[in-house]
Amino acid sequence: MKLMPLAFVIGAAVGLSACQSLDHTQNAISTTKTPSTQAEHHDIYTQTLKNGLKVIIKQDSRAPIVMTQVWYDVGSSDEPIGKGGISHFLEHMMFKDAKGVSHDDYQRLISHFGGELNAFTSDEFTAYYESLPANQFPLALQIEANRMNNLILTAEEVATEKQVIKEERRLTTDDKPTAKAHEEFLAIALPNSPKGLPIIGSMPEIEAITVTDLQNWYDQWYAPNNATLVLVGDIDPKTALPWIEKYFGTLKPSSLPKRTPLSQPSHRGYTQTNSYQNVKVPSLIMGFNVPTLGSRTIKNHTKEAHALSLLSDIADGGLSARFERHLIRKLQILNSVSIRYNMLSKSDDLFTIIATPREGVSLADAEAAILAELNAITNDQITDDELARSRASLLSSLVFANDSIAKQASNLGALSALGLPLDTLDTLPKALDKVSKSDIQAVGKKYLTKDNLTTVYVLPKNTQSPSDTH
């Protein structure tokens, strides 16, 4: 389970007026009324403001800091054809000037208090955060509320940032052969889903985005009823809520448009294609269309997602896993292999395998060996030790996923943005205990089949024949 945001740290700023205003609002704590519609999930406090803003607060007093995050329920999967990358572009622009705020002062102010800030965009959400000393947490609220409502977009700033984003694409994709191949793979494996499109957008799309496009995107999606505010750290709800109401309570909700369905039909038949890149060593990318916890149109999707997570660990969960023991050490077919499956998603996704064969082993033979090993897992015996180790491995990763204030906030924000219950990770241990060996084998037989497989062979350009060019 992991989040894979396309994040780029963009230096930003908010004006010194934010610092000056804090002194005038200290007395608000005892006089401001808190809104209704509230609930508690163990040590997690949740509330929805009248304007639709979801608020999540979790107290963790191990360190005198507070992590503040705002998650907007919009990402690249919401973008119309021809406007690819606009969510990521707007993420950059959110660090520019806002009403009454200088972006230069913003960075200096956060640094002055020893804080940190960042943002990231995925196909399903866009998130911003500030980590500050606990006694300065209202500053983060003021920053985020101000730029949720008062961002200033200018043609000059857009033109300048466009060059930054184009260079980012060159560095992260165009100049990285494996990234380019993976971009091609996603387009083939998810042909009917906007999740198959690049988060950063194509170079022509980035070039075509205008200040008007960005303003419309901002007005459409950046509103309290499309956002979740998360605070985790040395803070209690009674202290935080008056400040939240002060800065966010007066913001107006927007009328949100209808979203594009993210589902991707599976079992479309086997697809294999070649991607010729500037690489010296061939590799392959294999992807099966599978459900996640958010695949609500698929019956039993929750149990299937849990079973797929356990299956991925049985196959690729360390030195004692099947791929390592059989394909790398015993048969010596592969040099490396890894599985990527994230059950935390709004909709259908991919069970992806990336592998590099040993010298002298063809990509077709490597692919066949991987399929044979998956077939052995789903048709032969899964041992008690394998199942126990797989459960323990996933639970161990869950512990590490909550070992810091920042990770706790990110988990809560992501779950809210994805429309999943906030106790999803808390209830995971019991859910995994209910998954049997037969459940794991059943989900493997259902989804990890060749008629549900897309494979891309990543090959050196110098092996490309004239008939393969296009």
Image (tube, grey):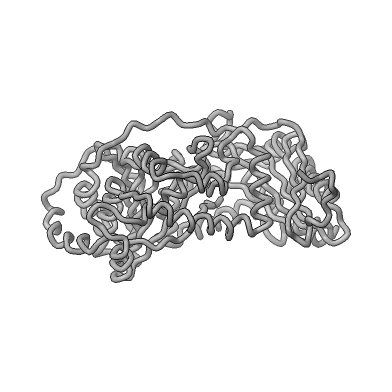
Residue at 37% of width from left, 37% of height from top?
Answer: 220
Q: Is residue 301 left or right of residue 37?
A: right
Residue toward you, 317 or 122 = 122
- Residue 200 visible in the picture: yes
* Quadrant that contains the C terminus: top right
226 above or below 6? above
229 above or below 95? above
Residue 364: give x, y in percent of width and height: 84, 48
Q: Position of residue 420 (x, y in %)?
A: 45, 40
Q: Position of residue 321 (x, y in %)?
A: 72, 56
Residue at image x 58%, y 28%?
299
Residue 360 is left or right of residue 255, and the answer is: right
**Left or right position of 378 against 428:** right
* Residue at left offset 64%, top offset 59%: 175
**Number of numbered discs visible in the structure rendering:** 0
Considering every residue shown, the one lying at the far right of the view is 360
**192 or 162, nearer to the observer:** 162
**Residue at left offset 51%, top offset 52%:** 5
Of 243 and 36, nearer the camera is 243
Q: What percent of the width, then of the height, locates residue 408?
A: 42, 55
